[in-house]
Image: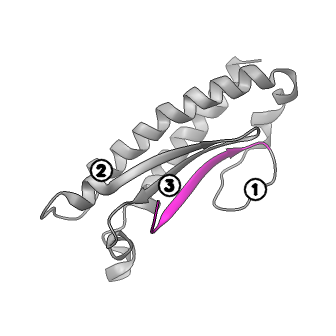
C-alpha cells in the first residue's frame, strides 16, 4: 500500500492516526470480547467493500485509462482492540489527484467523511444489538 492512505478505525483504546471513536460503543466490550471481535471483523470486511465502491463510483476525475479509478482500493487490519478500513491509491500519481488544484479531484478524504459517518452509525447500532 504505497502512497496516500487514510484510515478509518474503530478503536477500543488510544490509537494514533485518523480515528473516529465513540466511547459509548465500548461499554459492554469486556463482557463479550470474542463475540465482539467476530462481529467487528465481519462488519469491517463488509464496509471495506462499500467504502471502495463509494470511492470508485464518485471519483471526480475523467478517466483516460481507468487505472486510477481501479487503483482506488481498501484494505482491512484487525487487532485485539482495533478494526481498521484503509482507503488508498495504488497508482503512483494518486497523490496528485488528491492534492493538485487545491484538492479539486480528491476522493479519499471526501469518502472517509461520507462513509465514516455511516460506518460509525452502523458500528454503534451493531454494538447496541449485542447488549
Which x, y percent locates residue 9?
63, 48
Residue at mark 1 to residue at mark 3: CA–CA distance: 19 Å
Magenta includes 6?
A: yes
| Residue 84 appears left or right of 99 | right
Dot 1 or dot 3: first in sequence order is 1
Dot 3 or dot 2: first in sequence order is 2
Which x, y percent locates residue 127?
70, 26
Residue at image x 34%, y 76%? 96
| Residue 67 appears left or right of 80 | left
Could you say which disc has been placed on residue 56 in the image?
2
Tell me, yes or no, whether the two marked residues, 1 and 3, touch with CB atoms within 8 Å: no
Tell me, yes or no, whether the two marked residues, 3 and 2, touch with CB atoms within 8 Å: no
Write down the residue under mark 1.
15
Tell me, yes or no, whether the two marked residues, 2 and 1, touch with CB atoms within 8 Å: no
- 10 Å neighbourhood of mark 1: few (<14), some, or many (≥20)? few
Q: Residue furthest right?
A: 30
Q: Residue furthest bottom?
A: 101
Q: Is residue 67 above or below residue 119?
A: below
Which x, y percent locates residue 23?
79, 42
Residue at mark 3 to residue at mark 2: CA–CA distance: 15 Å
Q: Is residue 97 above or below residue 68?
A: below
Dot 2 or dot 1: first in sequence order is 1
Residue at image x 78%, y 42%? 12
Write down the residue under mark 3.
113
Question: What is the secondary structure assignment of the residue under circle 3?
Answer: helix
56 vs 4, nearest the viewer? 4
Residue at mark 2 to residue at mark 1: CA–CA distance: 28 Å
- 10 Å neighbourhood of mark 3: few (<14), some, or many (≥20)? few
Could you say which disc has been placed on residue 29 in the image?
none
Amino acid at each position: 500500500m504505497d502512497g496516500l492512505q487514510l484510515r478509518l478505525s474503530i478503536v477500543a483504546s488510544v490509537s494514533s492516526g485518523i480515528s473516529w471513536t465513540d466511547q459509548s460503543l465500548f461499554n459492554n466490550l469486556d463482557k463479550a470480547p470474542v463475540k465482539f471481535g467476530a462481529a467487528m471483523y465481519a462488519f469491517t470486511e463488509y464496509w471495506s467493500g462499500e467504502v471502495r465502491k463509494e470511492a470508485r463510483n464518485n471519483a471526480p476525475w475523467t478517466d483516460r485509462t481507468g487505472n486510477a479509478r481501479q487503483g482506488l482500493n481498501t484494505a482491512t487490519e484487525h487487532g485485539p482492540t482495533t478494526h481498521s478500513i484503509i482507503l488508498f491509491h495504488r497508482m503512483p500519481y494518486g497523490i496528485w489527484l488528491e492534492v493538485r488544484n487545491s484538492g479539486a479531484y480528491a476522493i479519499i478524504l471526501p469518502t472517509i467523511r461520507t462513509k465514516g459517518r455511516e460506518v460509525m452509525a452502523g458500528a454503534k447500532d451493531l454494538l447496541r444489538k449485542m447488549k
